[in-house]
Amino acid sequence: MSHNKAINLYLVGALGQIILVCLLVFVLRRSGVAVDYTTPLGMLAIAVGGISSALWGAVVSIKYKKIKLTQILRDFFNVAQKPRSYLLAFLFLFLDFFSLLFGGGLNISIWYAPVILFFRALLFGGIEEIGWRYFFQPALQERWDFVLATLCTFVSWAIWHFAYFYVEGTMDVVDPIPFLIGLLINCFILSSIFNVTGSLWLCAMTHALINVFSQLAVGGNAYVSYGCRVLIIVIAIVLVKRNWNNTSLKRSKSNVVSN
């Protein structure tokens, strides 16, 4: 399978599937049928739409990268990563929610609520990484630089998310501008983590934790948040560039030795 065909197949599959679900949900709602979290039909629609990015990420990875499904599953659950790789993920999480230290906090009613939310977020959010970071972003970076590939992923991911919000019936409660800004930051965080560590698990874990903290976060200093978000983008770009330079240097040395 060619590079362009793989990219197109993923986008047509992932976006096409959830848009088709959107159209079906629209027709059902116009007919007076309740389709949301409170109905079995709604849960089915959410599941079918929500699985689209992971499903097509796996399909195209198998066809284009020749990766077996068992390998994708092992990568998704491979928690045995280097401590410094976890530190990188936690650094981004710390910066992303650092503003909560200034007049904010986490609203936790029951101590085990974050644990439940994490596993739920891993299933309904982290699994998306099989598509966006495991296949799509690396495929784009075969032709484009990190920043351009991340921006393209952001646009595609945003379209997917708004379609998903419509399916689950939460479109009315989403504030588009803050959401899009947060999504852009998350793109840089998750894409840089995958570039530096190559770990699907760390992307899924970080994605899930971002979702959890976002649900629990209350208040915080807006100016500190803006500053941290700019810093996150700078750190992400610097780390990826440094990692790329180190990888290129190692390859050059290897070629010299082999010759």
Image (spheres, rainbow, N blue to C red):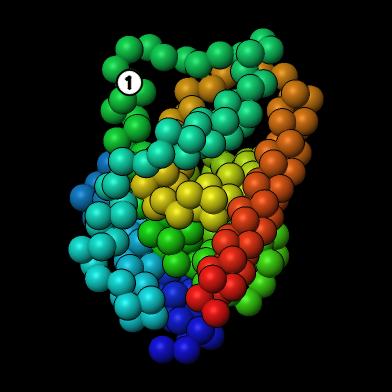
State the image quarter where residue 113 is shown. Answer: top left
How many numbered circles are shown? 1
Q: Nearer the viewer, residue 247 or 233?
A: 247
Q: Return the x and y of residue 102 as percentages of the image width and height.
A: 68, 12
Q: Can I make out residue 143 in this image?
A: yes
Please tell me in which quadrant of the rendered image residue 109 appears.
top left
The residue that appears at 29% across and 61% down in the rendered structure is 72
Image quarter in which the C terminus is found = bottom right
Give the residue displayed 35% in from the left and 52% down from the top.
127
Picture layout, residue 175 above or below residue 46: above
Q: For this rendering, which residue is in front, 95 or 81?
A: 81
The answer to whether 189 appears left or right of 121 in the picture is right
Residue at left offset 43%, top offset 33%: 83
Q: Residue 5: image x %, image y %? A: 48, 87
Nearer the observer, 105 or 82: 82
Rendering coords of residue 52 (x, y %): 36, 64
Residue 228's x, y, as percent? 71, 31
Question: In which quadrant will I find the N terminus?
Answer: bottom left
Dividing the picture into quadrants, the one containing residue 21 is bottom left
Residue under pointer 1: 113
Q: Amino acid at mark 1?
A: Ala
For the point 38% across and 59% down, which residue is it? Answer: 130
Q: Secondary structure at mark 1?
A: helix
**Where is 29 relative to 98, above or below?**
below
Density class for disc 1 (Cα within 10 Å; few <14, some 14-19, many ≥20) is few
Judged left or right of residue 6, residue 179 is: right
Left or right: residue 145 compared with residue 136: right
- Whether residue 37 is visible: no
Q: Is residue 35 above or below residue 104?
A: below
